[in-house]
């Protein structure tokens, strides 16, 4: 009834132009734009930007101060060098560095940054998780 | 360099047992569990739970109060009845209702709820976005 699936991630943003510029500097291309909303195709799902205030209203709580940080998005890479390269690209695009990529306790390699609205991204290489040729994570059973 | 892709969504939670119970009541089955972390396979990506304090520390900002709400996750459904059914299931599981499913300005049908940690889910039917047989969103060009 409730699928084990996410089809859209919406990021509330204070400034749509700034958000588009940041993700554009990472090489992302919008798929669909309407006034006040931008969508990116992520392959089987989408990521969208929506103003913070309109998002609070859309969620049924107009005027609410929405917070960030307790939900982070991650990108897995095939090796450490790819993590470093993407992290440098984000930093050049104006990301706030939270933790530079380093070897971590679970046996991988990971760094964190925040985008201009405080949304947190983790860039990681996890030697225990396999990626397919499209860059998707394989299920443990695959 | 930075793929247009999300491979992992991590939800910071105050109580891992409570979080597992809530998503379990929606029918979700963990794929991988280690002390303090639970992962679910979402098909090409994973969703994980991690304690709020450990998440703040992992992000490189120990002690930070992480906020929720400005990043919402959505599930798209093939019709309105499927939205209603999943919404009722979430409410029965203890979700906080933010906005009951209703016809919305962009031509779809959408409701919002918050999970026990304040993470926001949108359940929607969007007549303009096609789903494939696996429940993934098709790209606009497909």
Image (spheres, coloured by chain):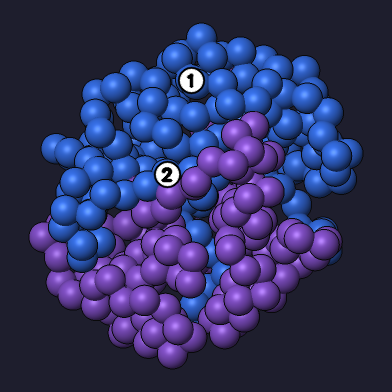
Chain colours: A blue, B purple
According to the picture, the residue beneath numbered tag 2 turns out to be A68
- In the image, farthest residue toward the left: B105
- In the image, farthest residue toward the front: B63
The crowd level at tag 1 (other Cα within 10 Å; few <14, some 14-19, many 20+) is many
Name the residue nearer the viewer: B100 or A67: A67
Can you give x and y, in whole percent of width and height, for residue B36 in the image?
Answer: 76, 60
The crowd level at tag 2 (other Cα within 10 Å; few <14, some 14-19, many 20+) is many
Q: Secondary structure at mark 1?
A: loop
Can you give x and y, in whole percent of width and height, for residue B68 in the image?
Answer: 42, 53
Residue pictured at 85% horizontal, 43% vertical: A106
Q: Secondary structure at mark 2?
A: loop
Are marks 2 and 1 in one subunit? yes
Count of residue discs: 2
Position of residue B8 relative to residue A60, above or below, is above
Position of residue B107 relative to residue B23, above or below, is above
According to the picture, the residue beneath numbered tag 1 turns out to be A95
Q: Quadrant of residue A110?
A: top right
Mark yes or no: residue A139 visible. yes
Residue pictured at 56% horizontal, 78% vertical: B22
Task: Name the subunit of mark 1.
Answer: A
Q: Quadrant of residue A88?
A: top right
Residue pictured at 34% horizontal, 19% vertical: A21
Name the residue nearer the viewer: A120 or B74: A120
On screen, residue A59 versus residue A122, left or right, reads: left
């Amino acid at each position: 009834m409730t699928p084990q699936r996410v089809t859209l991630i919406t990021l509330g943003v204070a400034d749509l132009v700034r958000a588009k510029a940041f993700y554009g500097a990472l090489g992302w291309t919008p798929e669909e734009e309407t006034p006040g909303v931008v969508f990116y195709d992520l392959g089987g799902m989408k990521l969208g930007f929506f103003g913070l205030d309109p998002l609070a209203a859309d969620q049924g709580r107009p005027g609410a101060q929405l917070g960030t940080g307790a939900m982070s998005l991650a990108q897995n890479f095939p090796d450490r060098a790819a993590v470093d390269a993407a992290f440098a690209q984000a930093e050049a695009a104006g990301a706030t560095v939270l933790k530079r990529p380093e070897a971590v306790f679970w046996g991988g390699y990971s760094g964190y940054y925040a985008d201009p609205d405080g949304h947190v991204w983790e860039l990681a290489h996890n030697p225990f998780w396999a990626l397919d040729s499209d860059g998707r994570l394989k299920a443990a059973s695959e």
